[in-house]
Image: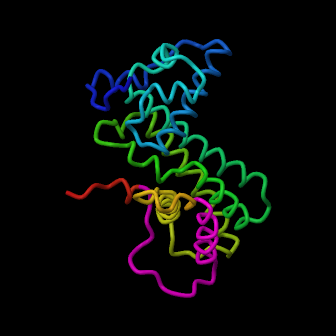
Amino acid sequence: MSAGVGTTSAKKAKCGASSPRLRADALRNRERIIAAARETMVEFGAEVPFDEIARRAGVGNATLYRHFADRLELIHHVTLSVMSRTADQAESVLAEEPDAFRALRRFVHAAVEEKIGALCPLLSDGVDRDHPDLLAARDRLEAAVEALMGAARDSGQLRTDIAVGDLMVAITQLTRPLPGSACVDFDKFVHRHLQLFLDGLQAPARSELPGCAATLEDLRRRKP
């Protein structure tokens, strides 16, 4: 059975409503559902049937609906999960890796595994992009990536004419599925192309970039 993407503002409010503390088994089920939803939405798009998500998570449909009343609520939590996991990666590599540019490389290669480009279309007009939970997750992600880039920049290894938005656009573009099914093995090329991109980020810059460095705020602005 498939739940529609459309919703009312009342449903939007539910996405951020605090929920009671879950038992360990219920929490595991919730996490499995979110992971399965992320995986299937990357493969099939936002309209993947809830039956398939439940099957992939190894739970019954009733369990899925007990945690997520509709598709919009599930998409909201999938988005939060991806942003949180990506921020975790940025913070971890910065703490673990003494070489700042190597930390940036590790982060970017790990971040593409989140398939951010494939998940971007989930943030359709039906999703409240200004929900407090999403804004907080976005701010945390931006701060974590900026800290990582700042360290690489301060070490003299990262060119100075790029910003967080430039990096996130590249990750998004490299993980966006190609139309059609001819490139079924496209994923195996992503890390090769990503390495080429990273080589171009190193200082000293070999060319002057057109335009200005892009921030995440620049990416959020909509055309009038």
Q: Nearer the viewer, residue 144 or 188?
A: 188
Residue 104: x percent and y percent? 66, 62
Q: How many marks?
A: 0
Q: Position of residue 130 (x, y in %)?
A: 36, 39
Q: Residue at x 47, y 40 (%)?
A: 41
Q: Is residue 209 magenta?
A: yes
The answer to whether 10 is drawn above or below residue 219 in the figure is above
**Image-based side of 158 in relation to 9, left or right:** right
- Residue at coordinates 58% horizontally, 72% vertically from top-left? 197
Q: Which residues are magenta?
A: 187-216
Quadrant that contains the C terminus:
bottom left
Q: Residue at x 58, y 83 (%)?
A: 205
- When the figure is inspected, residue 80 is found, relative to residue 190, above or below; the finding is above
Q: Quadrant of residue 191?
A: bottom right
Vertical side of 102 occupied by 70: above or below: above
Question: Observer-nearest residue: 163 or 117?
Answer: 117
In the rendered image, the quadrant that contains the N terminus is top left
Q: Is residue 213 magenta?
A: yes
Q: Residue furthest front?
A: 182
Above or below 40: residue 155: below
Q: Quadrant of residue 102?
A: bottom right
Please state the horizontal and vertical placement of residue 38, each as a whole percent of the image: 52, 38
Instruction: Please give the name of the residue rendered at 60% of the width and 23% of the height, measured from the top-left corner.
Output: 58
Horizontal and vertical percent for residue 53? 50, 29
